[in-house]
Image: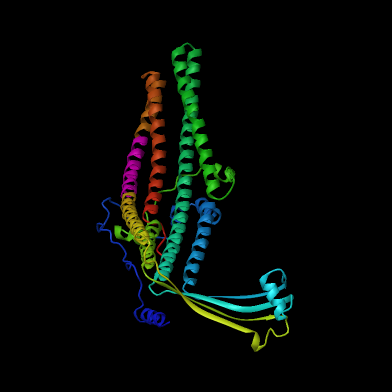
């Protein structure tokens, strides 16, 4: 008992906790991003900057009903339970029990024969009731390190859930922008198809009059049929994006097709919201916060492993009553009590504790490398997204100029063909160039809007680390 008292006193005075104390790892980054970009202040509901009520409703639905978000919330509940259990391990465990049993002793056993000689009854009832307590004294901080690790795991799980929410919101916006881009391309193809049909009618009329050859008619028909063939793949892709939006919103694929079937203009790409300082990524991106908390948990588990080098002391106590027959159960004579202390110390285990500590240190080194790698990949995401957004806007401006020039060229070719100045091939070439330019412009607008989403997501969206 003197040894136990000395150990307890030492623990209370020094507050000894084995294992390395955690220090947040540093990652050297530049003061600003290399890609030219305008970054606006962050907004929690960043998708509303696209100014599209239909998109707002889709994102709200996805955040409320998506199954991945529901699973992430369930993981938080699990991690919170583990953290509570780790905290409770530092406290005493107290239990209450009661029992009643009826026994009949065999007279053919030594105990039964002796009981008969001493006059003890062969049949008796035994009643017991009491409370039992146990407590492992955390002398060297192994349990405290375990609690520290569980809390870090909980914080990592919460950050992972926030990363899932950000990902689902971004995927919903991305799918919506792809849908609007495909619908714009479909409208371009359908418009060009009508124009091509008019040209076919004109050439057919000329062929009937003997002015145009069958070759010219077949050439224009081939162009028309080529445009018609480009429409089904676009319609299939549109259906795929509608199905994707339905599932992201927690619904059966195909739900809400009526609402999304009507094409609207592709939303303009807004400036992404966030911080111009790369170092802010480690606070603003939930996936990086989760990775950093996993490093903290791995660091704490080194202390959990190192605690096995030292003795473990536990206290046990029992206080209750017991009686044969029920009459004297609550009297002083029925009182029974016991108390004791236990010591467990792995003095010789042929290096098992050393191996466990080495494993824990290795896991921390792995978590640290993964964290630093994640930070570097995050800067890559931002640089690529900002560059894509800037170059996409430049492409849109040039494509719009190209479309205007090719529209004039197509109209001039039609007029010249009607006057007999140019051949039908010149008209078909002008139509083909105009169709391709209009299609690429629609793609550029959709891709640039998607680049804005990628930039917002890479910068951490509207999320900030929990305080």
Q: Position of residue 180 (x, y in %)?
A: 48, 43
**How has the structure been colored for display?**
rainbow
Quarter holding the N terminus?
bottom left
Q: Position of residue 153 (x, y in %)?
A: 43, 62
Q: What residue is shown at x 39% (from left), y 38% (from top)?
A: 441
Q: Mark yes or no: residue 310 visible.
A: yes
Quarter holding the C terminus?
bottom left
Q: Is residue 40 above or below residue 380?
A: below
Compared across the picture, whether 250 is left or right of 127 comes to left
Q: Position of residue 340 (x, y in %)?
A: 50, 79
Q: Main secondary structure of the magenta part?
A: helix
Q: Is residue 392 magenta?
A: yes
Please give the count of numbered marks on the rendered protein.
0
Q: What residue is shown at x 41% (from left), y 27% (from top)?
A: 431
Q: Is residue 76 magenta?
A: no
Nearer-the-camera pick, 64 or 108: 108
> Residue lying furthest top in this view?
210
Magenta part of the chain? 383-404
Compared across the picture, whether 344 is left or right of 18 comes to right
Q: Is residue 129 above or below residue 387?
A: below
Nearer-the-camera pick, 313 or 222: 313
Q: Position of residue 380 (x, y in %)?
A: 31, 49
Nearer-the-camera pick, 139 or 40: 139
Residue 308 placement: quadrant:
bottom left
Nearer-the-camera pick, 430 or 395: 395
Q: Is residue 464 above or below residue 55?
A: below
Residue 132 placement: quadrant:
bottom right
Q: Is residue 85 above or below residue 240?
A: below
Q: Mark yes or no: residue 277 visible.
A: no
């Amino acid at each position: 008992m003197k040894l136990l008292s000395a150990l307890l006193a030492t623990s209370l005075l020094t507050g000894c906790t084995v294992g390395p104390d955690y220090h947040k790892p540093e990652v050297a980054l530049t003061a600003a991003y290399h890609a030219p970009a305008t970054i606006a202040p962050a907004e929690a509901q960043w998708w509303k900057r696209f100014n599209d009520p239909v998109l707002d409703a889709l994102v709200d639905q996805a955040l409320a009903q998506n199954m991945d978000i529901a699973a992430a919330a369930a993981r938080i509940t699990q991690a919170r339970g583990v953290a509570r259990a780790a905290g409770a391990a530092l406290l005493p465990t107290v239990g209450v029990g009661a029992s009643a049993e009826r026994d009949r002793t065999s007279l053919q056993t030594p105990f039964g024969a002796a009981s008969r000689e001493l006059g003890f009854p062969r049949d008796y009832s035994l009643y017991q009731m009491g409370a039992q307590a146990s407590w492992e004294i955390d002398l060297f901080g192994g349990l405290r390190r375990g609690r520290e690790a569980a809390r870090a795991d909980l914080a990592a799980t919460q950050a992972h859930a926030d990363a899932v929410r950000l990902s689902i919101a971004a995927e919903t916006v991305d799918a919506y922008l792809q849908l609007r881009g495909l619908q714009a391309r479909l409208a371009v193809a359908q418009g060009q198809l009508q124009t091509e049909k008019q040209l076919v009618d004109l050439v057919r009329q000329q062929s009937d009059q003997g002015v145009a050859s069958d070759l010219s008619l077949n050439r224009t028909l081939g162009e028309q049929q080529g445009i018609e063939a480009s429409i089904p793949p676009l319609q299939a892709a549109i259906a795929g994006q509608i199905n994707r939006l339905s599932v992201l919103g927690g619904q059966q694929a195909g739900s809400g097709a009526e609402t999304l079937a009507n094409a609207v203009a592709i939303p303009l790409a807004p400036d992404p919201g966030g911080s111009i300082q790369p170092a802010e990524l480690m606070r603003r991106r939930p996936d990086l916060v989760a990775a950093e908390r996993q490093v903290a948990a791995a660091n704490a588990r080194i202390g959990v492993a190192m605690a096995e080098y030292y003795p473990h002391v536990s206290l046990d106590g029992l206080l209750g009553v017991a009686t044969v027959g029920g009459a004297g159960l609550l009297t002083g004579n029925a009182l029974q009590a016991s108390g004791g202390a236990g010591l467990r110390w792995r003095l010789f285990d042929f290096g098992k504790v050393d191996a466990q500590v080495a494993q824990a240190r290795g896991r921390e080194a792995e978590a640290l490398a993964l964290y630093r790698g994640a930070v570097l990949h995050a800067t890559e995401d931002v640089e690529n997204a900002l560059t894509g957004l800037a170059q996409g806007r430049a492409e849109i401006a040039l494509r719009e100029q190209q479309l205007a020039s090719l529209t004039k060229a197509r109209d001039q070719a039609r007029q010249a063909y009607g006057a007999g100045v140019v051949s039908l091939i010149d008209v078909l070439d002008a139509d083909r160039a105009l169709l391709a330019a209009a299609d690429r412009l629609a793609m550029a607008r959709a891709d640039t809007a998607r680049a804005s989403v990628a930039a917002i997501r890479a910068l951490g969206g509207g999320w900030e680390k929990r305080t």
